[in-house]
Amino acid sequence: MTTEFRPPNLALSTIGLSLATFMQVLDTTIANVSLPTIAGNLGVSSNQSTWVITSFAVSMAIALPLTGFLSRRFGEVRLFTACTLLFALTSFLCGVSQSMGMLILFRALQGAVAGPMYPITQSLLIGIYPPAKRGMALALLAMVTVVAPIAGPILGGWITDNYSWPWIFFINVPIGIFASMVVANQLRAKVEQTERPKVDYVGLVSLIIGVGALQIVLDKGNDEDWFNSSFIIVTSIVSAVGIAVFLIWELTDKDPIVDLKLFRHRNFTVGTIALILGYAAFFAIALMVPLWLQRNLGYTAIWAGYASAPLGVIPVLLTFVVGKYGPRMDLRLLAAAAFVVMGLTCFMRADFFIGIDFYHVAMVQLWQGLGVALFFMPVLTILLSDLQQNEIASGSGLATFLRTLGGSFSASITTLLWERRAVTHHEQLTEHITAYSPTTQAAMQQIGQGNQQAAAGVLNDIITQQAYQISFNEVFHALGWIFLALVLVIWLAKPPFTPKARSVSGGH
């Protein structure tokens, strides 16, 4: 049995780790609202500018499952410090980019070094906190995970409007340097056993090809009209072949680069499934609500951000309560309560209508925050509960990778469903509208004041708006039932959820 490591200043170590994670998660959304400005300044189309998001997402998705391998090779503290400093450097390079090609390249490099940051932070926090307080550490990390994506578009929009778009990347430089220096200093005495694992080149190459191609398909599918595009068809085939080779090889290789055998642990499997599906549904909400506010209700990007922002209020307020008292309860109860609350808020949105006011939208976001506050800590604790200390970095990296992939699937599927169902409803709503109907003639006379062409355009806009609203309501009705189904899933986990294998450094 070895003595557990404790840093000289636990609070300062936590701030350093949390700041780096906040910076990294913030960068997944901060550039979104700045794309039109970036496209204009660099002289490219808005469609080309979306590669700023895609390149980051693809590289991060590839790097995430490599976390376990990299931490064994270099050690967790060294890996965290290097990734955080490189993130600051690549952020600076993004800010000084003079062309779209340069920006996409540096965003890809930024995504690659960002991949291991979240799972390594999770592993280090669990390692430096005593077993009784690990729930607090995970709750704090969960709060960062929720608040950063909400703050991203608001902060990005404000910086772009008041300064210039490069500053959305430059702000990472001092934060990254500070966080890496603090963690390197506080954790320098932490003894870590590194090894030189054989590089699984087949696994690495098949991972890069399979996951990279899949992420491109999910990010670009809607823009390219899915399988009506030869680009999407070819990329999907490449992805399927790459992932098939990767899975077969990793499950049979003696020293795989990604340890898929972690799924032999029951709680890891159940917790990861709950995390993937729960996060995917949560991600769909986070994506659709601002889009709906802008498309249907005419909000600006900033005001859509303000209406969405109350989601982060309750997680901030309840973090320490959930972290302190949550582990004393059956964590399945907490997670089930989270799914029920988020399901109910989805059903509330299924009753939204065109004329709804800002207050009611914001209040539903606020109440959803209660579900989010109860979601991450218990689910993360459950999925890590039966892993050994030396499996935490691998398990966290694999679970975070699958969670991220679940979010990408969710974004593509919900956007596609919203669009396709809106087209269907538009057709249904126009079935009984003809130029020969007295009701239609009276309505067009009133709308257009004698101008038939203008009236027809206005009427079509109204029908389109209502079609999107009906489709929006349907999607949220489905999301509500997904959350309620997850209540059953989480009860497949088996207590106890105390970190018995990790109560000593290195496990048994």
Image (tube, rainbow, N blue to C red):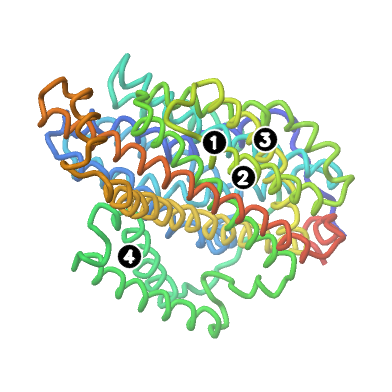
Query: Which residue, as the protein is rendered here, is positioned at the far bottom?
Result: 252
> What is the CA distance from the residue labelled 2 to the residue labelled 4?
27 Å
Quadrant housing residue 141: top right
Q: Nearer the viewer, residue 437 or 228?
A: 437
Nearer the observer: mark 4 or 1; the answer is 4
> What is the CA distance from the residue labelled 2 to the residue labelled 1?
8 Å
Quadrant housing residue 296: top left
Identify the residue position indicated by label 3 in the image.
Answer: 186
Q: Position of residue 117 (x, y in %)?
A: 53, 46
Which residue is located at x 12 percent, y 34 percent? 43
Quadrant of image for the C terminus:
bottom right
Callout 3 secondary element: helix
Callout 2 secondary element: helix
Circle 2 crowding by C-alpha within 10 Å: few under 14, some 14–19, many from 20: many
Which callout, 3 or 2, points at the residue further toward the start of the chain?
A: 2
Q: Using the image, determine if residue 295 lies above or below residue 482.
A: above
Identify the residue position indicated by label 2 in the image.
Answer: 121
Looking at the picture, which amino acid does disc 4 mark?
Ala
Numbered circle sitting on residue 20: 1
Are the residues at dot 2 and dot 1 in contact (C-beta closer than 8 Å)?
yes
Q: Using the image, determine if residue 28 lies above or below residue 267.
A: above
